[in-house]
Image (cartoon, rainbow, N blue to C red):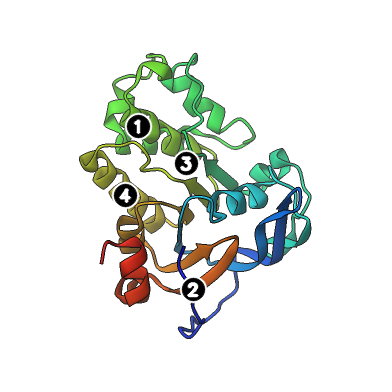
């Protein structure tokens, strides 16, 4: 565990696409998330780093409505979505790439992509062309069962499926987990490209160095609380962050 940091590095705030206000999530008597205040702006990649069990994944599940808030609020474009069902939240424009990818192994690659757009009423062809262009391996295997893809290919499919939802915000939980370094590098390049196309990303990631390098702002989680928030460049240079998460 790292010690508590003081919030001495200020970040200028803007109108937020996502905001949590004193968000608290309990598992029984345990506060997995404890009064967390976090923002994501329209054009940002916001990175969450911290040890296993520090609350990063629970925060994402709380935003998506998978875990109910014990207190506090979640605002999406200023609208209170606290307590809303996951289907409604996805329909508003939040997509999730869960830890473990969450693809449907018994369905084809194309069927998984179509599933990502299930709630849409507008034409999906532009996004389909984009994802098949960006992920050529998927274009070659549209009829293959998703469960037969390699781990890296399955992660690419999970990202592509999230893009098919045409979301305003994509949340990602440990996308590099279990992937080879070269695949991780390709994945993070694609995430940067997705962001450059105008989609905000909230990224919870154990590979702190990679995540901070592509991010704009970051939050360090420790025992369910935000221990430090700063720009990613500032976090990369912070001595305590370097020792705790970057290998010195």
Q: Is residue 28 above or below residue 110?
A: below
Measuring 35% from the left and 61% from the top, which residue is drawn there?
A: 245
Separation of marks 4 and 2 at Cα, in angstroms: 21 Å
Measured as percent of width and height from the top left, residue 197 is found at 40, 54
Q: Which mark is residue 229?
A: 2
Measuring 38% from the left and 29% from the top, which residue is drawn there?
A: 154
Q: Which mark is residue 132?
A: 1
| Among numbered discs 2 and 3, the one appearing first in the sequence | 3
Measured as percent of width and height from the top left, residue 212 is found at 35, 63
Q: Is residue 135 above or below residue 90?
A: above
Residue beneath label 3, please? 163
Local secondary structure at mark 2: strand
| Among numbered discs 4 and 2, the one appearing first in the sequence | 4
Along the line of sight, which residue is nearer the eye, 168 or 227?
Answer: 227
Measured as percent of width and height from the top left, residue 42 is found at 52, 64
Q: Crowdedness of circle 1 by 10 Å Cα count: few (<14), some, many (20+)?
A: some
| Among numbered discs 4 and 1, the one appearing first in the sequence | 1
Taking 154 as reference, is 39 left or right?
right
């Amino acid at each position: 565990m790292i010690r508590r940091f003081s919030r001495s590095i200020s970040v200028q705030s803007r109108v937020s696409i996502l905001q949590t206000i004193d968000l608290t999530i309990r598992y029984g008597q345990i506060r997995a998330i404890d009064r967390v205040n976090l923002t994501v702006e329209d054009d940002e990649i916001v990175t969450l780093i911290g040890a296993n069990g520090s609350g990063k994944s629970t925060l994402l599940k709380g935003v998506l409505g998978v875990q109910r808030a014990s207190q506090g609020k979640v605002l999406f474009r200023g609208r209170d979505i606290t307590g809303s069902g996951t289907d409604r939240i996805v329909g508003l424009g939040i997509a999730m790439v869960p830890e473990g990818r969450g693809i449907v192994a018994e369905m084809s690659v194309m069927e998984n992509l179509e599933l990502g757009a299930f709630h849409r009423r507008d034409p999906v062809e532009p996004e389909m062309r984009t994802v098949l262009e960006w992920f050529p391996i998927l274009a070659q295997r549209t009829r293959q069962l998703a469960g037969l893809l390699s781990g890296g290919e399955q992660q690419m499919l999970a990202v592509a499926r999230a893009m098919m939802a045409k979301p305003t915000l994509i949340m990602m939980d440990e996308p590099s987990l279990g992937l080879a370094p070269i695949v991780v590098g390709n994945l993070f390049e694609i995430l940067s490209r997705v962001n450059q196309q105008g989609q905000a990303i909230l990224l919870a990631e154990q590979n702190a160095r990679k995540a901070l390098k592509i991010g704009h702002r970051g939050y360090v989680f420790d025992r369910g609380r935000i221990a430090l928030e700063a720009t990613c460049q500032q976090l990369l240079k912070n001595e305590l962050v370097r020792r705790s998460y970057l290998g010195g």
